Amino acid sequence: VTVVVGGRAQRATVRTGSSYLSQSSLALVFGLDGAPGADRVSVRWPDGSEESLAEGLAAGFAYRVTQGRGVVERRRLAQ
């Protein structure tokens, strides 16, 4: 996942399956440095396809993204 804010890109990878009887978190967290939202978000899926999400994903929310469907859920984070 690549998030661009103010011309600066941040990248993070979801790692599935880690070791016996455990799993890594599927959530990624990006710092927006006070910006009201991300300028651009793109996801590269395991099959190599890339998907750009709608511009203007607002700060302060958790988003669930599904391949081919984009954002399928938006939930406000606790302050």
Image: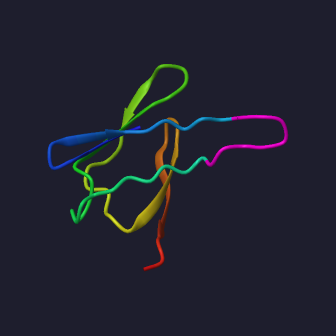
Task: Report whether 73 appears left or right of 33.
Answer: right
Task: Report whether 64 appears left or right of 41.
Answer: right
2 over 25 or under it: above or below: above
Position of the N terminus, as image quadrant, is top left
Task: Report whether 58 appears left or right of 19.
Answer: left
Q: How is the image coloured?
A: rainbow
Task: Report whether 2 appears left or right of 14.
Answer: left
45 over 5 or under it: above or below: above
The residue stretch that appears in magenta? 17-25
Closer to the camera, 14 or 65?
14
Residue at the front extreme, as displayed = 19
19 inside magenta stretch = yes
x and y percentages locating residue 79 in the rendered image: 42, 80
30 over 22 or under it: above or below: below
x and y percentages locating residue 35 in the rendered image: 21, 62
- Secondary structure mostly taken by the magenta-highlighted segment of the chain: loop
Tell me which residue sits at (39%, 33%) in the image: 51
